[in-house]
Amino acid sequence: MQFIEISKLKPGMRLAKPIYNKIGVMLYDRDTKLTVKGINSIAKFNLIGLYILEPAEPLPPLSQDDLDFEQFQTVSVFQIRDIMMQILTNQEVQDIGILAQNILRKYGGMDHKINFTQSIRSTSDYVYKQSINTGILAAMISNQLGFSYNEQFRVITAALLYNIGYLFLDQQQILNKHKQFTQYELDMLRMSKKKGLDKLSEERLSDLFPPGALEIIQQMVLTDTEESESKSTNTRLLPGTKILRVADTYDRMTAMNMEESPVSEVSAIRHLKRHAEKYEPAAVNALVQAIKLLPTGCSVDLSNGEKALVVEENPMNFQAPVVLLFSNNKMLDLSDPEIAKDIQILDTMKTMDNRIHIDEETLKQFQSDENLNRTLEKFRRARQRSQEAAAKKAASEGDSGSAEKE
């Protein structure tokens, strides 16, 4: 899979991901071969490029969750763009609560992990995509932490508007940076965020926020000044702000853009964990429990120089799955202390899409000893227990959640 800029698309190229319009109708399915007419039509969507399959590349697997996520992102980005433009141009503003409720309904009560896939960003859509993705992450983190409906609604609403100030930036390309900012860029970011806060604080927008949401935004703007990790602590922050800070940083680090290569999901989580003084550990752990970081089929680089494929996730420790070595088809249990002392996962392999289809029949070709079989079965039972517990929790809290909503 490769990313091709719109100007370089050619007839016969096959789409790796579906294309939806602003109301969620699929216009082009995966594996569709582009035509001259199709390319001209897609060029009007203001996309900077598309994911294209290599000529002989099979269609990568996408679950229904993956497809729903792609569609939901597309529709929601159009909606938040309209809302932000209405705020900035002093028009009558749509009810942002509807969008927040849609995110809460879709991702605020999930009983299983999902692939949190990033779409490519440009300077023209960065703010909107960041807003939606941070809102989705905030919904999943707050769910894992057991927040009430009202608490979740508050932090999701804040997540949808906390970054509106970035639209005041004269040089929006600096948003795509994942690395160290210059002092000039820091000053620009601070000024733009302050302008956004001033705009949201206008009296005419007072009914836009549920109680407490604007306070979370104020803390994100006034305390998160992009200083060094050692200078910024989370001790004085509201619970919602702590969640939003984790969601914001994870999204920015893993976002895909044309300026810089993104940080891997694994590296982003390790960064958050290393800086517990800034990123609430409970919120980081909740994020780990909400999204797939090293899913089955993921390709990884190991500390011994080998490359491997994840064949079974570890529900207790995502960094210690069972992997299959590419060099000799040998399976290793990285949760085994004897193996882990010499071999660890360094990072995921740098590919546009590291999901490789591997089915049960294929896995039967590989030999494993009794200890490894027991480990595989232990991981599977643990995952099943986790899913059953989550389903039971959702069922027991259903009535109370409905009552709070009313």
Image (cartoon, rainbow, N blue to C red):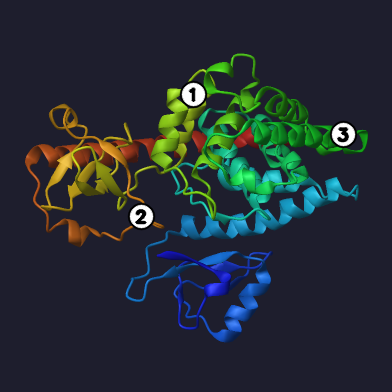
Within 10 Å of disc 2 (Cα), the crowding (few <14, some 14-19, many 20+) is: some
**Which residue position is annotated with label 3?**
206
Q: Earlier in the sequence, mark 2 or mark 3?
A: 3
Q: Nearer the viewer, residue 257 or 374?
A: 257
Residue 104 visible (yes or no):
yes
Residue 385, x across and y down, in percent: 34, 36
Amino acid type at circle 1 is Ala
Q: Residues within 10 Å of mark 3 (few under 14, many from 20)?
A: few
Residue 134's disc is none
Q: Position of residue 163 (x, y in %)?
A: 70, 39
Compared to residue 122, the image places residue 282 above or below, namely above
Q: Is residue 266 above or below residue 273?
A: below
- In this picture, residue 161 sits left or right of residue 398: right
Mark 1: secondary structure: helix
Q: Nearer the viewer, residue 43 or 297?
A: 43
**SS at badge 3:** helix
Q: Nearer the viewer, mark 1 or mark 2?
A: 2
Looking at the image, which residue is at 27% across and 38% down?
345
Task: Give the alpha-carbon distance from disc 1 to disc 2, as whole Å.
Answer: 28 Å
Q: CA distance from mark 2 to mark 3?
A: 45 Å
- The residue located at (52%, 75%) in the rendering is 9
Q: Is residue 378 above or below residue 260?
A: above
Q: Is residue 208 above or below residue 330?
A: above
Mark 2 = which residue?
354
Q: Quadrant of the C terminus?
A: top right
In the rendered image, the quadrant that contains the N terminus is: bottom left
